[in-house]
Image (spheres, rainbow, N blue to C red):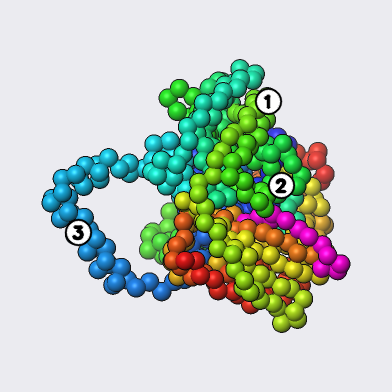
Amino acid sequence: MDKNTFSKKVNKVDVPKEDVLQAIKIGISRAVEEQRPKKRKPILKTWIMTAAAAGILMSSSFIFPSFSRVLADAPIIGGLYANFNDMVGRSLEKQNLVKELNQTYTSNGVDVALTSAYYDGYLIGITFDVKGNLQEKDGYYYALYELFNGDPLADETKELTTMTKTKDGYTGHIRIVYPYKDLPKNDTIPISFEEIGMTRGNWQFDVPVQQNPIEEYVFENKESTNPEGDVVFKVESVITGKASTAITYSVTYPKGELDSSFAMLNVDSNSQLPMGGTSDGKIDQITNGDKTTVVRKLVIPDLLRNTSLTVWPSYDETHSPVEPVKIDIP
Amino acid sequence: MDELILIRKAIQGDSEAFEQLLIIHSDRLYRTAYLYVGNREDALDVLQETAYKAFCSIKQLRNEEFFLTWITRILINCAYGVQRKRKNVVALAEQLTIPRERIDEKMDLTEAVGKLPENYRMSIILFYYYDMSLKEIAQTLNTPENTIKTYLSRGKKLLRKLLGGSYFDGQKHIL
C-alpha cells in the first residue's frame, strides 16, 4: 500500500463536523476559563441582588404597562449580529450604534455586499453578504482579505474568516483591531478580499467609519520593573468606547532582547471579563540608544467601568518578570 | 491561506485565531484520534482535550512552522490518556463477563492500525497519513531515525498480518 491509498482509506472515516466543532469550542473555552484568574464571588450577595432586581422588574411591569412594552421590544439577540460571535457588535446593535452600509463589488461571478460597520474604541466590525457559487474547504466557507493595503507598519493585515450559509447566499463578519497608535474620529478602511469560497478575485472596498465617543484615562506613574531593573513596564492609558475597553502599555528592554516575545497582557480583575475575543498587538516601537520601547494595546470586547485591574506583561523567560501594576478604571 | 498569521495570533493568546486553526486541521486531527481510539465518542473526547491542552500551552510553541507537528504530538498524548482509561474499563468489564471466542474476521485498515503497538502505530500514521519524512518523524517523536525505521518496518509487517495477504505491500517508499 502506498501513502495515497493509505490516506484514501483513512479519509473514509466520517467526520461528524458539528460535534468536532463543538469539541474544539468546549476545549478552548475550558482553557480560556482556566487561564482567567479565579475570582472570589460574593455568591449570596449576587443572588439576593439578582432576586431583588427580578422582583422589581416583574412588579414594575405590572404597575407601568409601558415598561413591559419596552421589554418586549428589546431584541434578545441583535438582528444582524445574531449570526456572529461578536459581543461588541451585539451590544452596539442594541444601542443603535451599528451603521448600515450598502457597498457592492463583483468579481469572477461572486457578489460581495458590505451590510454594516461599527467603530468602537480600537475595534472595527464589518458584516458582509456574498452571492455566488462558492466552494467549501474542509466543510467551511472561507474568505481571505487584506486590510490597510497590506501596510507593513500595521501589525496584522491579512486575515481569514468563515462564512455561514443563508437562505440566498452566505454571510460573514470581519472584526479588526485598529493597528495604529492614534485613533482617528473618522477613517476610511481599505479592505480587499482576495479569495472567497475558493474563488480567487479582487473585491475592493473603502469603508467609511465614524468612531463612537470615547473616554480616555491617562495614567501617571503606573509602572514597575523586574528585580534586575532592565525591563520597565508602564501602563499608559485606558480607552473606553461604548462596548469595548483598551489598555495601552509599554515595555522597555535592552535593545533586541525581547523583540517578538510578548504574549497577551495578563489581567486579573475583580469583575467578570469576557471569554475570548480579547486581543493584544503592537502599535509602536521606538529604539533609543541601547533600549527598545514597544507600545502595545490590549483590547477587551466589553465595556469595563468602575473596576480595578491588575496587569502585567509576559515575555521571554530570559528576563525575569516585572511586578504587576494595579489600575483603576473610573 | 495565511495560516502563519493565525498561528502568530494564537501564540499571542487569541482564542478565535486558535479556533480557526483547529477548524482548518479538524478533519485530519479527528481522523488521527479515531485511528487511535477506534470510536466516535472517544475521538471527540481526544479532540476536546487536545484543544484544551494545546491552547493552555500555545505560548510554548517556539517555531510557528511546526504547528501541525506540535499539535499532533499533543493529540497523540491525549489519545494515549483516553486509551489508558478505556483499557482499565475494558479490563474490569472482562472480569465480569464470560470470555468469548474471538471471531476471526478480516479487519479494516483503521481497525488494524488501532491494534498496532503504540510506537509502531504512531510511526505508521505520521509516515503514511501525515506524509512526513523519517527525519521529521524522528524529530516529532524525539526518537532516533533508525529506531523509526524499525518501527515502520515492524509496523508494516504486523499490519500485513492483521489485514491478510498482500494488502499492505508498499515497500517502495524508503524501507
Tags 2 and 1 both on a single chain:
yes
Q: Earlier in the sequence, mark 2 or mark 3?
A: 3
Q: Chain of mark 1?
A: A
User: Residue at image x 69%, y 39%?
Assistant: A148
Q: Residue furthest left?
A: A63
Disc count in the image? 3
Nearer the observer, A38 or B135: A38
Secondary structure found at label 2: loop
- Give x and y (percent) for residue A25: 49, 50
The percent coordinates of residue A145 (x first, y second) are: 65, 35
* Residue highlighted by disc 1: A202
Q: Earlier in the sequence, mark 2 or mark 1?
A: 2
- Contact? badges 3 and 1 (CB < 8 Å): no
Subunit of mark 2?
Answer: A
Q: Residues within 10 Å of mark 3 (few under 14, many from 20)?
A: few
Kind of element beneath mark 1: strand
Left or right side of B126 for A247:
left
Under tag 3, what secondary structure?
Answer: helix
Q: CA gap, disc 2 to disc 1?
A: 21 Å
| B117 relative to A329 in the view: left or right | right
Q: Label 2 to label 3, Cα distance in Å?
A: 49 Å
x and y percent of residue A253 in the render?
77, 69
Q: Which residues lie in the magenta part?
A: A280-291
- Residue that badge 3 annotates: A56
Secondary structure, magenta segment, majority class: strand
Q: What residue is pinned by disc 2? A: A154
